[in-house]
Image: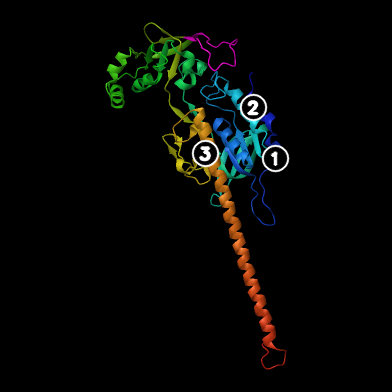
Amino acid sequence: MWFNAPAIVSLVLPLLAAAAPVSTNSTTQSPRIDYDAIIVGGGPAGLSALSALARVRRNVLLVDSGEYRNGPTRHMHDVLGFDGVTPAYYRHAARQQISQYGTASLTNGTITKITPEQNNTYFSVTGKYEGDKEITFRAKKVILATGIRDILPDTPGIKENWGKGLFWCPWCDGHEHADQGLGLLGPYDGVPGTVREILSLNTDIVAFVNGTDTPEERELAEKKNPHHEEYLKLKKVTVDNRQITSIERLRNGSDPSADPSLSSVAEHDLFRVHFTEGEPVLRNAFITSFPKEQTSKVGQDAGVQLWGGRLAVDSTKGLVTNVPGVYAVGDANSDNSTNVLHALYSGKQAAVSIHILIERETANAELAALNSTAAAGSKRSLREEARAVWARMNGEPGELLYAGEFDQ
């Protein structure tokens, strides 16, 4: 069953167009807080955080831009209970389940600005929503589940076939191409490590290093993997250093008639790799090693630091960033683990931390107010007692000890 992701979100709960922007109470001048937390991003990490917060009846909004790293992928794998489903179906099923919780809201939109207010006691979160409407909401906490994107080369055939025979994760897509002719796309220094990851699935391997087989790259590979050249020869890995001009698809390996209840179905793609010189090479699939970047800069713009291109988090404090009250989960954070299971765990981890922290902050505020009231009450009681003593001892006007009214 296939689903359109933006349409799914709009079906779950009403869009924010009907909601009012932030306001200030004219009597107390205290800001209206719209949500306990706003989650930026609707992939597995964001949905996990939304579910966990909704389960403890936190009022939460998830804003989904509709951009997902695994969007082009044919099927999702290695997620128990959902092995072999499409990414769109997984998100649909998650939204359907979460929609049963009354404090969870989901909507389409793109968050453009996050502004800490009053020493990070709350945040103004501005976004563009349906009809290009700009709305700002206030939340006590913010969760960044914005993900990362692969920086794909402009080589013809790579972007067009991404996620469909060209993949980056052996656990996510490798099993469907087991025992086939595999190509590696990436710099030379990463070849030995990738070979170790994939050898239990593929032994017919050609590494297309696209001109990066240089003395410098070999030295770097040797530092990371001692005796790597002997290892590649032992495993009969061919290194092709020619410049790639294009990757041509000859056959689509997906099988529309395959049983959708099966966890894994073999995909028999076929590609022809063309070079600036020499004969082309045929391969069934490719595992890639391309650089990555943050999908959104909204976290950086809010002051979140980057560690190695990832949003820096403290894993001992619920994945909070250097900006108190802002958390980062999933592929975007500095855990450096990029898979659905990590995304789900990190979303839950941040949600639990936020729930407890909000309750602690609420308790502290309530106790402070209670103590203030008690102190004020004590002062009033003492004053009234003093007034009564004054009335007894002061006498009447005209008497010798009369000193006037108590309140002067």
Please name the residue shown 29% across and 21% down the image: 218
Where disc 1 sits, the SS reads loop
Q: Choose the circle earlier in sequence order: 3 or 2.
A: 2
> Which residue occupies the foreground of this view, 57 or 112?
57
Residue under label 3: 349
Q: In the figure, 403 relative to 178: above or below?
A: below
Please name the residue shown 49% across and 39% down the image: 300
Q: Position of residue 146 (x, y in %)?
A: 53, 33
Residue 378 in magenta stretch: no
Q: Is residue 263 left or right of residue 34?
A: left
Where disc 2 sits, the SS reads helix
Residue under label 1: 19
Q: Choose the circle earlier in sequence order: 3 or 1.
A: 1
Q: Position of residue 184 (x, y in %)?
A: 40, 16
Q: Position of residue 37 (x, y in %)?
A: 59, 42
Q: Is residue 90 left or right of residue 204?
A: right
Mark 3 or 1, closer to the camera:
3
> Which residue occupies the foreground of this view, 10 or 179?
179
Q: Choose the circle earlier in sequence order: 1 or 2.
A: 2
Determine the CA span between mark 3 and mark 2. Answer: 27 Å
Residue 264 in magenta stretch: yes
Q: Crowdedness of circle 2 by 10 Å Cα count: few (<14), some, many (20+)?
A: some
Q: Amino acid at mark 3?
A: Gln
Residue at the farthest bottom position: 400
Colour setting: rainbow
Q: In the figure, 78 relative to 234: above or below?
A: below
Q: Amino acid at mark 1?
A: Ala
> Which residue occupies the foreground of this view, 35 or 22?
35
Span of residues in magenta = 249-270
Residue 406 in view of the camera: no
Q: Which mark is residue 6?
A: 2
